[in-house]
Amino acid sequence: MLAKLLTPVLMRTGSANVLGSASARLIRNLSSSSPPKLRRSMKSLAAVPNPLPATFLRGGTSKGIYIRQEHLPSDRAEWAPIFLGIMGSPDPEHGRQLNGMGGGVSSLSKVCVVGPPTDALHAQGIDVEYTFCQVGIRDANLDYTGNCGNLSSMIGVFAVDEGICKPQVSPDRPEIGVVRAFNTNTSKRVDTSFPVSAEDGSTPILDLPQVTIAGVPGLASRIDLHFVSPAGARTGKLLPTGGPIDTLTVDFEGKTHLIQASLVDATNPSIFVLTRDVASMLSASGSPQINFGDSHIEECIEAIRQSGACAMGLDPGARAQPKIAALEAPASHSEHPRIIAHAFSMGVLHKAIPMTLGLCLGVAARIEGTLPWQIASSASGSQQLRDEVPGPDRCDDQYAASDLVRIRHPSGDVDVGAEFGRDGRVMSAKVVRTGRRLMKGAVWW
């Protein structure tokens, strides 16, 4: 058994090849050959094996370690040395995490802990529950204050692979499986749907040439990600301050600045500011032509983020939440994207966009008066967006309107959507992702 644990099993599936019956059987065999099931969680850190059974997966534009809850101590405070050791943190001098599985950027320093739902959640139709952890890179900080949209897209796949649950399959669409997950960070439901094998009706198929996403090469199976009732994930309110725009007081480089911001909490709390307003803090000319990768810009953005966090009633010292993005309209209204966004995560410019931030931006673009709404209205035509605003005369069921907003980020474009009820409540936020199994085995901590 020890030798079995010490030998990681690599699973590679080319994105251009359709997963056949033999590969599907391999995945099932790997799942069935996992270490014996333990109780719901270990009693103490001393009982945790080293190496630890784990799976390495790509979800969207992030990669992370997925661990079964039963393999960890019941006390979350004892997870710290395990997660830090796995990721190779802290790495204060180099910030590369070469001593672990991390990749030196926030999108590659993540852990998901997955387990069966509580009896109460199971009674509500939940198939699996999970906790997300953002692991610090240069420091030893573990942040549980928010969720990760990208890694959420693979929770259902991991749960099915591990035998934690079976996907729900509709007779009308037997080729698609659905898993309903409960995120403990935000106490919100997150549903994923993905192709399943025709042979057994449950094994997730990830390498069908269906869709591509910005930032990831090649085609892969489509994974639909739905955040159900995402408003108020942390603060309890869609607009934590009660209004679509706030004026923040920001102290930066010995001066006090006033800057407009939209503070929105959907999937995760987020702060949206205009690129030109950030530029005006940095230059008397107010030119919007700024280099977002410059450390000076990052310091300015972080000062704004901390002020926004205070306004939302959140801890400004928690670097993972809220996230922040600087927005601008496309140069020409003929361009397809409605909003151009430069997002920052853990104080650093994101190479794409954190998906919970992107989903929140999609919701915010539908809320009249917010900065994202103003940009989207300008890009698409104010009358068109006004016609899409939910109203009691729009439809007869619980969903009044569904609209996709195309966001351009440094790696390309992403379409995010929001469904609003007739009463104006956010029913769901949605996005299409892809994922890939990278490795299943054991990891040293």
Image: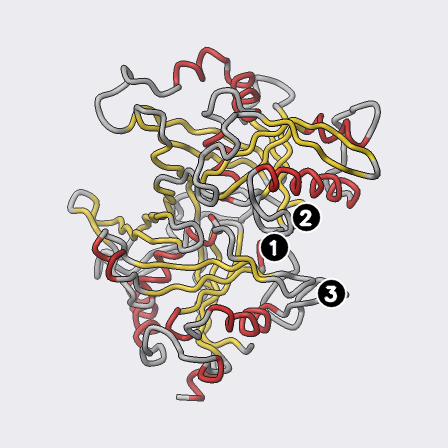
The kind of residue tagged 3 is Pro
Residue 17, located in which quarter of the rendered image?
A: bottom left
Return the x and y of residue 396 as percentages of the image width and height.
21, 22
Find the distance from the CA under tag 3 to the CA under tag 1.
14 Å
Please report contact status of discs 2 and 1: CB closer than 8 Å, yes or no.
yes
Residue at (83%, 23%) from the top-left corner? 285
The kind of residue tagged 1 is Ser
Find the distance from the CA under tag 3 to the CA under tag 2.
15 Å
Disc 2 marks which residue?
A: 348
Return the x and y of residue 66 as percentages of the image width and height.
45, 65
Q: How is the image coloured?
A: secondary structure
The kind of residue tagged 2 is Val
Which of the numbered marks, if any, corresponds to residue 24?
none
Q: Secondary structure at mark 2?
A: strand
Residue 137, located in which quarter of the rendered image?
A: bottom right
Q: Earlier in the sequence, mark 3 or mark 1?
A: 3
Disc 3 marks which residue?
A: 92
**Between 419 and 28, which is closer to the camera in this rendering?**
419
Residue 25 falls left or right of residue 2 = left
Residue 360 falls left or right of residue 278 = left
Return the x and y of residue 356 as percentages of the image width and height.
49, 43
Residue at the limit of the structure toward the bottom, as seen here: 2
Disc 1 marks which residue?
A: 106
Graded by Cα atoms within 10 Å as few (under 14), some (14 to 19) or many (20 or more), the crowding at tag 2 reads some
Count of numbered labels shown in the rendering: 3
**Between 242 and 267, which is closer to the camera in this rendering?**
242
Q: Secondary structure at mark 3?
A: loop
Residue at (69%, 62%) from the top-left corner? 138
Find the distance from the CA under tag 2 to the CA under tag 1.
8 Å
